[in-house]
Amino acid sequence: MSSPTTRVYSGRYELVRRIARGGMAEVYLARDLLLDRPVALKMLFPELSVDESFVARFRREAQAAANLSHPNIVSVYDWGEGDGNYFIVMEYVDGKPLSSHLRGEGALLPDRAAAVGAAVGAALAFAHKAGVVHRDVKPGNVLITNDGHVKVTDFGIARAGSAQEHLTQTGAVMGTATYFSPEQAQGLPVDPRTDVYSLGVVLYEMVTGQPPFTGDSAVSIAYKHVREAPVPPRQVNPALPQAFQDIVQQAMAKDPANRYQTAEELREDLLRYRQGRPVLARPELPTEALPPTQVGRSTQVLSQAGAATTRPTAALLPDRRQARTGAYVVLLLVMLALLGGLLYLLGRSLGYFHSASSAPVAVASVIGMAPDQATNTLKGQGFKVATQEQNSDAAVNTVFDQDPKAGSKAAKGSTVTILVSKGAGTASVPDVVGKSTADATSALRAAGFQVSTQTQANDQVAHDRVISQDPPAGSAAPKNSTVRLTVSGGKAQVAVPDVTGQPEPQAANLLGQAGLQVGTTTRQASDTVPSGDVISTNPPAGTQVEKNSSVALVVSTGSTSPEVPNVVGMTAADAKTTLQSAGFKVATTTQADPNPADNGRVIDQTPTGGSKAQSGSTVTIVVARLPGTSTTSAP
């Protein structure tokens, strides 16, 4: 096989060099020859490419990732096969993974860690809404561009939420043990909350400089995720604010029910932290181990080869003494009794134990209605109505949520709570003056604002830097409102005026009026442009250049052609000698002339004496002759 630099796949992707190696594939920098742009080409290892079932899953996962179009997700462009290898073509990100930043810089400042975490949360929330769970969130899969933009990559082991297959067989790497959720470590089904846990581990590492759990093997690390409590981040980094620790601990709750229930909830709390607002994180038991009933299931761990295998939990957990079995049985019976009582009370509250005359009815949907209309609708069904006003992205004074939900059944006379939007609320506008357009836009969107830009020439502010913002920094503005940025287009541009054919002083004056300066002046002979006039300019007329730029002039020194001597009145021989001495050829014609004094003398010439003509050109002379003499023309 030829060297990687000469391999071309699908007739358009030319490999340039290898840039990374992962658990399933190698990643190359390649060039899309069709669109002339750099791309990242992820090539499956040959040993995985021969597994048809794995390749089929790999293709479906590539297709799922290709549907994830989001600013914080690395785009997937294409999928294909060549030389027996399967590959995915992705957006090339010019930057470094978060893992490299952590190795080089150590722990990050909490505000920066919150900004990176919020961007990752935005990417995961978008993927989760599309039914895709990443399942391998780690610093190596978080890329940070050179201008600070965050992108999540490698959905290669992600699985669409509706898929029926699980990638849990031997040979399929199912994540990285250091960032496993407890349910991943036990081989249990996963949902978006597993990504929330892994992002919590990444946040922990960003602010402490180390992961919460380490060990000699993947097995020991997986055991710690299931059964051990991590050291609180503030014990590792005492400068860390309590609010950030609360966010990390709630995200890393071992029971999924105690975590943030969505990546969006985690993202919003990180944004609250960055804005100096109170966070909603209230970790009740941030380090609780999973109960024995969950730990008792089979546990998925990584073998020494790095492949996912399924082993009994006994490999991770210590044996229980036989004497404790009776206590668990008693506890189980008590819990069943309590559960039965709770189910009965719930049924009564929903009206399932009422008589037929008070049977529960389906709650109508009132989302989007005005409060009065929603209240009348629900009261018409026999419900009581409680109204609460909250900030929301929904239109002001409209219902954006209700409890119980639309379609659920509730007893007549029970209360339906409607949540009415007070608008998105306000937030402090960040200071983005002087930042690049990309950085300013990212900061404003993270603060909850929309962004519009206009370009304006500016001689003092560098190109693509923000000159001003409206509203100004520090002011309170409604969330989701637009912050207008004026961005420098660099120095003003002017068109070079056409000064060709103008005398040199007048040309210099016209250039000055246009805001330009006269640069170098070159003198050059011209047979067509009079001496002292401009022959041409550099840059040429009409070119757009920066104001105050210099324009070079080429000025004519006049013609280089010699002057034709005046030979009228000379004898033919003298005229010929004179013209040839001046560098011209001579042609002679005769013309009858009755004046004996003119006989044999030149009575006319072309070109006329005193005019300019090219050296070596022919001058025709007319020589007088007496009537009746020979008319032969001399050469």
Image (spheres, rainbow, N blue to C red):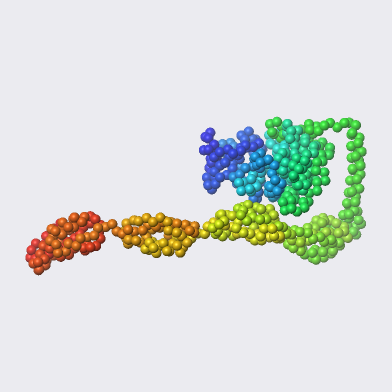
Q: 383 or 242, which is in the foreground? A: 242
Residue shown at the point (86%, 32%) measured from the top left: 320
Q: How many marks?
A: 0
Q: Quadrant of residue 440?
A: bottom right
Q: Position of residue 503 (x, y in %)?
A: 37, 63
Q: Quadrant of residue 382?
A: bottom right
Q: Is residue 343 visible?
A: yes
Q: Is residue 400 visible?
A: no
Residue shown at the point (75%, 39%) measured from the top left: 212
Q: Position of residue 572 (x, y in %)?
A: 13, 60
The answer to whether 339 appears left or right of 394 in the picture is: right
The answer to whether 358 appears left or right of 105 in the picture is: right
Above or below 200: residue 278 = below
Q: Quadrant of the C terminus?
A: bottom left
Residue shown at the point (89%, 46%) measured from the top left: 339
Q: Position of residue 92 (x, y in %)?
A: 59, 45
Q: Quadrant of residue 216?
A: top right
Residue shown at the point (92%, 57%) measured from the top left: 355
Above or below 615: residue 315 = above
Q: 548 or 369, which is in the foreground? A: 548
The answer to whether 318 appears left or right of 202 in the picture is: right
Q: 329 or 232, which is in the foreground? A: 232
